[in-house]
Image: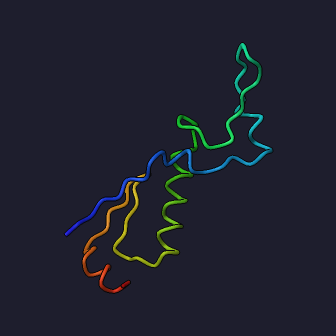
């Protein structure tokens, strides 16, 4: 049995440090607009997001969980559920 979890707006869940926000700025007719959260379309965003998901799942200690960007597959969720609860 497999289960699939989908994280909504994966990229937008990660904050951008203040020092980097200015580099992501856009000039609009209303003035400067900067990203406070990671924007989709940045060159290294997918790599960073994947590395973060791998780290989070490793720290969670669920060996059957595998992340692919904003999707997490868990093999044997029923057995894991019994183990956790």
**Residue situated in front as seen by the camera: 43 or 37:** 37
- As drawn, the residue found furthest toward the right would be 19
Q: For this view, does 43 lie left or right of residue 63?
A: right
Quadrant location of residue 76? bottom left
Q: Position of residue 54 (x, y in %)?
A: 49, 64
Q: Which residue is rendered at x = 48% and y = 75% of the image?
A: 60
Quadrant location of residue 23? top right
Q: Which residue is rendered at x = 74% and y = 48% of the image?
A: 17
State how many labels appear: 0
Q: For this view, does 59 lie left or right of residue 71?
A: right
- As drawn, the residue found furthest toward the top would be 29
Q: Position of residue 53 (x, y in %)?
A: 49, 60
Q: For this view, does 5 lie left or right of residue 47?
A: left
| Image position of 68 with respect to 61: above or below | above
| Image position of 9 with respect to 42: above or below | below
- As drawn, the residue found furthest toward the left would be 1
- As drawn, the residue found furthest toward the front would be 85
**Residue situated in front as seen by the camera: 3 or 46:** 3
| Image position of 64 with respect to 33: above or below | below
Q: Which residue is rendered at x = 36% and y = 85% of the image?
A: 85
Quadrant location of residue 27? top right
Q: For this view, does 59 lie left or right of residue 80?
A: right
**Residue situated in front as seen by the camera: 55 or 85:** 85
Q: Position of residue 21 (x, y in %)?
A: 74, 39
Instruction: Assign the N terminus to one quadrant of the image.
Output: bottom left
Q: Position of residue 84 (x, y in %)?
A: 38, 84
Q: Which residue is rendered at x = 76% and y = 24% of the image?
A: 32
């Amino acid at each position: 049995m497999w289960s699939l979890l989908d994280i909504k707006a994966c990229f937008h869940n990660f904050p951008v440090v203040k020092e980097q926000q200015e580099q992501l700025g856009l000039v609009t007719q209303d003035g400067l607009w900067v990203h406070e959260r990671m924007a989709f379309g940045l060159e290294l965003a997918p790599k960073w997001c994947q590395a973060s998901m791998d780290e989070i799942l490793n720290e969670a200690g669920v060996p059957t969980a595998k992340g692919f960007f904003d999707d997490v597959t868990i093999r044997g969720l029923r057995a894991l559920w019994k183990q956790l609860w």
